[in-house]
Amino acid sequence: MGEALMGLGAFVRGLFTSGDAGISVPAMDGIFKPNNRLEEAERLLSLPTIDNLAATSGGLLCSAGPRLLRIDTNGASVAAVEIAAFSAPITFVASAPDGRLAVGVEGDGLHVGQPGGWQRVDLQGANRSCLTAGAFAPDGTLFVCVGSRDHPARDWKRDLMEGGASGVLVAVGATDGSSRVIASGLAFPNGVALLGDGRLAVSESWRHRIVALDPKSASRPVAMLEDLPAYPSRLSPASGGGLWMALFAPRRQLFELVLREHDYRREMMATIDPDEWIGPELAGSARPDQPLSQGSVRQMGVLKPWAPSRSYGLVARCDENGVPRESWHSRADGAMHGITSVWEHGGDVYATSRGSGTLLRLAATNDGGSAHG
């Protein structure tokens, strides 16, 4: 008992003293200065399990659990029309210029084709339950992110807590469906998009960065954007060049400390329900038994917008060099948290708030890719 209390005391002291001054996260400032633009965005649809967006010549698609939906925005009201359904939740959707689609299905792997004509593609040993993102090249090659070879996509928090870096990027041939690994040792690759020079941009969630790599060579990934203030998710091209970036949860000093304290983290994982682990979340919770960051408590019944919450909403637009140029936020006291996908289509920018189950629309301006809520 005495040793346990000493360990707890050391842990608490680390939270409030300078002994762990090296534990820090970048402040949300500059381009990432907090605002309410996601909260003020148009809320188009309520879909509790909405996740990945993709655009085709026939319209905007999104996934919601096991369903693949087309978003109908032509009428007076916005509607979601089911065009396909699978046996398990969809983990990513990608579209090709020729109309083909790629869909990752938890436990059932990669499906390529069109509604009514799907072909299952074997990725040769990759974890078919953790296909997190995909993008087609102009020649038809499909690049697929496998977030983890150890855990399914739904166990992303466990992969984070175990320091997961087993992710791979796979290239799937357009004609024969053959696959090859073009990058490995990635810390939960969670988004991929083509850059103008032929390279790929890949988000590494657990390393809080975007890397660029050449799919035609065996060169190591090169960091484009490092030390982000949140965990990056899926990427998509922006009109006029550059990228849209979804960030699904905030980084917090408390999270970084737990990730560093190996004994504490292992015991937490072994003895506590995953929903109560100290770590990032897709949505906020009002449950009284939820772990709290210092200051993330209601005072006089009000949660302050600057409180270090476990969830957050964040979208960023980057230029062709990967430099962030603009950002949209839903702060601690907001509801549009857990942004997992963003896509520009038909002059508008759409984003999915997985935390609230909401499809958002940000009206695009005329500056070649900016948007305002």
Image (spheres, rainbow, N blue to C red):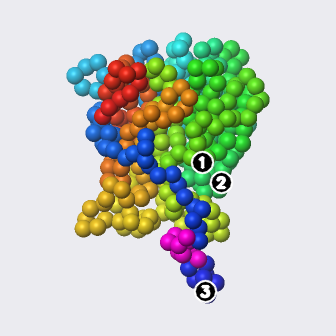
Image position of 17 with respect to 185: above or below: below
Element class at badge 3: loop
The percent coordinates of residue 67 (x first, y second) are 45, 32
The percent coordinates of residue 9 (x first, y second) are 56, 79
| Image side of residue 216 versus residue 348, left or right | right
Q: Residue at x 33, y 48 (%)?
A: 335
The amino acid type of the residue labelled 2 equals Gly
10 Å crowding of disc 2: few (<14), some (14-19), many (20+): some
Q: Residue furthest left?
A: 76
The amino acid type of the residue labelled 1 equals Trp
Separation of marks 2 and 1 at Cα, in angstroms:
8 Å
Q: Residue under circle 3?
A: 1
10 Å crowding of disc 3: few (<14), some (14-19), many (20+): few
Q: Residue under circle 1?
A: 206
Image position of 349 with respect to 17: above or below: above
Residue 118 visible in the displayed image: no
Question: Is the Cβ of the residue at disc 3 closer than 8 Å to that at disc 2?
Answer: no
Please identify the quarter of the rendering in which residue 372 is found.
top left
Counting residues from the start of the chain, the first of labels 3 and 2 encountered is 3
Element class at badge 1: helix
Separation of marks 3 and 1 at Cα, in angstroms:
34 Å
Question: Is the Cβ of the residue at disc 3 closer than 8 Å to that at disc 1?
Answer: no
The amino acid type of the residue labelled 3 equals Met
Element class at badge 2: loop
Question: Is the Cβ of the residue at disc 2 closer than 8 Å to that at disc 1?
Answer: yes
The residue range painted magenta reads 10-18
The percent coordinates of residue 137 (x first, y second) are 61, 19
